[in-house]
Structures are given as structure tokens and as C-alpha cells.
Image: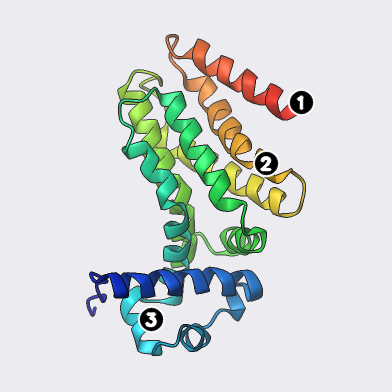
Amino acid sequence: MAARKRYNSPLMAERRQHMLALTRQMLAESGYAGLSMRALAARANVAVSTIYAAFGSKDDLIYEASSELYQQSFDLASASPHRPSLEIIALVCDGLGRNTRPSVAYAQACCRIYFLAERDSTLGRKLSSLLHDWILDLLGTLRARDELQPWTPLATLAQDISSHLWAMVYDWTLGRYPDATLGTRYELILTTALLPYATPAFQPALTARVDALARLLAG
């Protein structure tokens, strides 16, 4: 397999960002079927070979466009290792909400791909991993801090949480929830899912946070 082109210079990094932004725009406009590498190359004013060299396949490109959008939110967790767990969760979920809200059409296109893609397909695996991998890392951190029971099924729980988050986002794209509540809904789904596995020491703080989030949404 040929090596991917590296974007080390500021100019090339800017070109990469432009192509990813165009990918998100075209996906929002036309969905998966309407996004072609040739059309993207024409709009980005680059050769088709440049896009393939930089990103590989169309599925890889879509994953990179999604990952790039949310990575800043995920990085908050690794940049805050000494913060309380609930504070890290709140920061990341707020960031995810802010990054999701600006483009309803793009989020809906990604949700449709996620739910319709075969789970053994490249794109199905990649989009499944987008939230799953961060959640799995978070669960591992919570267990290392003795905040989750040692018997917690981390991989299964991460997959369940990820699926519920994707489903909630899709409902939001259909207008079922106000935009401003998106980050709170991310957080409520995640924290509620942790309740059955919380250790006695972590349970009171976690329960109080779940109750506060539920009241916030109810009000």
C-alpha cells in the first residue's frame, strides 16, 4: 500500500482542512451517494490523485472529516487527566454538543450512514469507532480510578453508550430536541449508563449529577 501524503507544511495542512470542510459540506448536501472524489477534487481545485494520496478511500475520507470535527472535544479528556471524572465528562459532552449543532444536515447524513452501513464494512467500523473508542478510554480511566466496578463489561458498555448517543443525535436532527440541549443529552445518556456499574464511593456524586441533568432538561 502506498504511503499517505504527509501534511507537514502550514500550506498543506490548510489544504487538508479545506478538503475535509468541503467533504462535510458535500455530505450534508448530497449524502453518501452524492459525494464523489472527482466532484470533491473539482470543488477543492486539486487533482483526484491528491485526495486519494492524502486520505485513501472515500470511506476513509468521510471518517477523517468526522473525526477531525470532534477530535478537539475528545482531546479535552487527555488534556485534563487530573480533573474529576464528572468534570471531564461534562467538558467533553459540552464540546461534542457545540461541534454537532452547527450542521444538522451533516449530522443527519452521518447518522444515516452509521445506521445503514454494514457493521462489517470499513465505513461501518470506522463510524462506530468514532464515539466508541473515546468512551472505552473513558471507562478504562473510571475503572482505574476505582469509580467503576472491576467486573464492568467495558467494551459492551462502550458500544451500548455509543449506539444510544448516535440514536439521540439522529432524533435531534429530526427536530425532536432543542439545539441548546444537545450537550446535556450527551452527558445524561453517558452518566445514566454508568449508574449500574458505579462503585459505592462514586455512586452518590454520579447519582446527583444524573438527577441535576434530568432536572435541567425537564425545566
Tell me the tag on residue 3: none
Residue 120 visible from this viewpoint: yes
Kindly state the secondary structure of the residue where label 2 is placed. Answer: helix
Q: On the rendered structure, is 172 left or right of 148?
A: right
Residue 101, percent from left and from top: 62, 51
Q: Taking 5 as reference, is 124 above or below it?
A: above
Q: In which quadrant of the rendered image does the N terminus lie?
A: bottom left
As rendered, which of 36 and 124 lies closer to the eye? Answer: 36
Q: Residues within 10 Å of mark 1 (few under 14, many from 20)?
A: few
Q: Taking 1 as reference, is 173 above or below it?
A: above
2 or 3: tag closer to the N-terminus: 3
Q: Give the distance between the C-alpha atoms of the residues marked 2 and 3, in whole angstroms.
A: 35 Å
Residue for point 32% across, 21% down: 145
Q: Give the distance between the C-alpha atoms of the residues marked 2 and 1, in whole angstroms.
A: 13 Å
1 or 3: tag closer to the N-terminus: 3
As rendered, which of 182 and 152 lies closer to the eye? Answer: 182
Q: Taking 27 as reference, is 91 above or below it?
A: above
Q: Can you identify the residue that label 1 sits on?
A: 219
Residue 163 visible from this viewpoint: no
Q: Can you identify the residue that label 3 sits on?
A: 51
Residue type, label 1: Gly
Tell me the tag on residue 180: 2
2 or 1: tag closer to the N-terminus: 2
Residue type, label 2: Ala
As rendered, which of 78 and 152 lies closer to the eye? Answer: 78
Circles 1 and 3, Cβ within 8 Å, touching? The answer is no
Corner quadrant of residue 57:
bottom left
